[in-house]
Amino acid sequence: MKLMVAIVNDRDAKAVNNALVQFGFRITRLASTGGFLRRGNTTFLIGVKDREVGTVVDLLKETARERPVMVPAGWGDSFEESVGEMVEVKEGGATIFVVPVEEMYRV
Ligand code: 2BA
């Protein structure tokens, strides 16, 4: 068994949620905030059988969209320097961690 931790943009959370539930996965949603952009994102906890990992990755690929966003140059390094020039960073898509689970109980 694996625990998948998937961080997606809030704008995609509904589509991701719907797709996972439609395919019969059990999920938990946590409200979270990205440390770099400091914007809301959603962290999904998904307990799956080993052979289901690929299906979840595919569903996340289909439903979590990557978009370019502009942030001030130097964002994250020094707020004093973050005036003027803007640079593009990618927001969205899904960041996925797959963690082995020793045991799981629902009692
Ligand atoms: P944020 O930290 O808000 O990052 C949003 C996006 O900003 C990142 O997308 C990346 O494209 C960009 N970014 C992040 N740090 C950067 C930096 N130091 N310099 C330039 N650009 C930077 P993703 O990489 O797809 O990450 C999306 C969200 O997933 C992150 O939101 C964070 O909440 C989470 N995440 C990503 N990698 C993680 C990790 N190794 N551990 C824990 N959470 C992670």
Image (cartoon, rainbow, N blue to C red):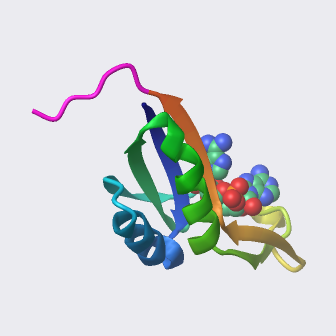
For the point 16% across and 35% down, which residue is it? 106
Position of 99 with respect to 80 (left or right) is left
Q: Position of residue 34 (x, y in %)?
A: 57, 58
Q: Position of residue 31 (x, y in %)?
A: 38, 60
Q: How many marks?
A: 0
For the point 84% across and 74% down, which residue is it? 88
The span shown in magenta is: 101-107
Q: Identify which residue, 44 or 89, lies in the foreground.
A: 44
Position of 5 with respect to 81 (left or right) is left
Q: Would residue 77 be visible to someone looking at this image?
A: no
Q: Residue furthest left?
A: 107
Q: Where's the C terminus, which quadrant?
A: top left
- The correct choice, above or below, for 71 with respect to 43 in the image is below
Q: Identify which residue, 40 or 47, lies in the foreground.
A: 47
The picture quadrant for ligand 1 comes to bottom right
For the point 64% across and 65% down, which residue is it? 61
Overall secondary structure of the magenta section: loop
Q: Identify which residue, 71 or 24, lies in the foreground.
A: 24
Q: Position of residue 84 (x, y in %)?
A: 87, 80
Q: Position of residue 75 (x, y in %)?
A: 76, 63
Q: Identify which residue, 101 or 93, lies in the foreground.
A: 101
Position of 40 with respect to 97 (left or right) is left
For the point 90% across and 78% down, which residue is it? 85
Q: Residue furthest top?
A: 102
Q: Where's the N terminus, which quadrant?
A: top left
Q: Is residue 106 magenta?
A: yes
